[in-house]
Image: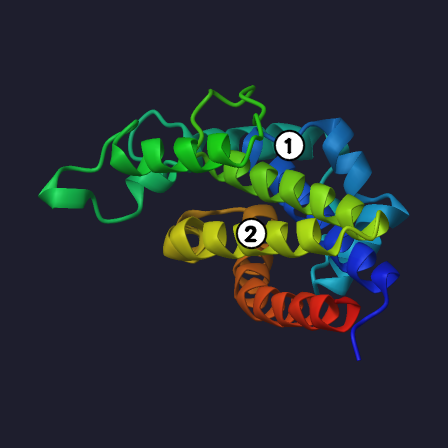
Amino acid sequence: MAPPRNDMVKMATARANVYGLLANVFREEPSEALLSKLEEPEFSGALHALNLSLDEVFERTSRAQLVEDLALEFTRLFIGPGSNLSPHESMHVEARFGEQNSFWGAQTVAVKKFMEAAGLKIDDSFGGMPDHLSAEFEFMQRLLLKEAQAWANEDHELGANILRIEKRFYEEHLSQWVSKFCDKVIDATEHPFYKQFCEVTKGFIDFEIEALQDLIGEAEESDRLSA
């Protein structure tokens, strides 16, 4: 028997919230406003559901000092000067045709074309690179919100089609580099904030492939029953 529509709406919305949260974490150095949001019930509940607790982070120091510490760590990890871990897909996947990894290479263009084909414009406040980790997470968030609306409108065909787009983007892009990038950050970071968020990001990326396969199967079953 196919799942009730409200279950599909809830699942899409929950997944969208996680992608949105992770996009905010990796977009820029955490602001005091973001840290405050993470302590609100809506976000703290989501974090606990992902087996993530930031109690240690918030108890270590004052809020003002925490904001300063995280700004320094964000810069050290992702910006430089010196060696840093670029949060761009093009710098973590094998370049095509033996080329050197570079910004706006073939992989970046592939991400851009995928997003444009899906008809979604992504916020470029973090620098305008479509293969930035936050851009890819935001793209999935936007897809999921459209999927949730499709199920709410009982548009089974649209909901199933968006699920297939999510799965393809996951397979062609997210699965190719996000976990490897997170492993590098975990090894390099000196702050539990980024260590814990990278651990939960890896766990969520692992969860996604099974979730997408199951949800697509459920959507196809629903289409058969409603035909």
Q: Few, some or many C-alpha atoms within 10 Å of disc 1 (few <14, some 14-19, many ≥20)?
A: some
Whether the residues at callouts 1 and 2 have beta carbons within 8 Å, the answer is no
Residue 147: image x %, image y %?
Answer: 71, 48
What is the distance, in whole Å, between disc 1 and disc 2 at their CAs?
27 Å
Whether 203 is drawn above or below 31: the answer is below
Say whether residue 153 is left or right of residue 213: right
Q: Few, some or many C-alpha atoms within 10 Å of disc 2 (few <14, some 14-19, many ≥20)?
A: many
Which of the 4 image quadrants contains residue 5? bottom right
- Amino acid type, mark 1: Pro
- Amino acid type, mark 2: Glu
- Res 84 visible: no
Residue 14: image x %, image y %?
Answer: 76, 54
Which of the 4 image quadrants contains residue 103? top left
Which mark is drawn over residue 166? 2
Task: State which quarter of the image contains the N terminus.
Answer: bottom right
Whether 194 is drawn above or below 196: the answer is above
Task: Identify the residue at horizontal 77%, vertical 50% (top origin).
Answer: 155
Which of the 4 image quadrants contains residue 120? top right
Q: Earlier in the sequence, mark 1 or mark 2?
A: 1
- Element at label 1: loop
Q: Nearer the viewer, residue 105 or 43?
A: 105
Task: State which quarter of the image contains the C terminus.
Answer: bottom right
Say whether residue 58 is left or right of residue 214: right
Q: Nearer the viewer, residue 30 or 8?
A: 8
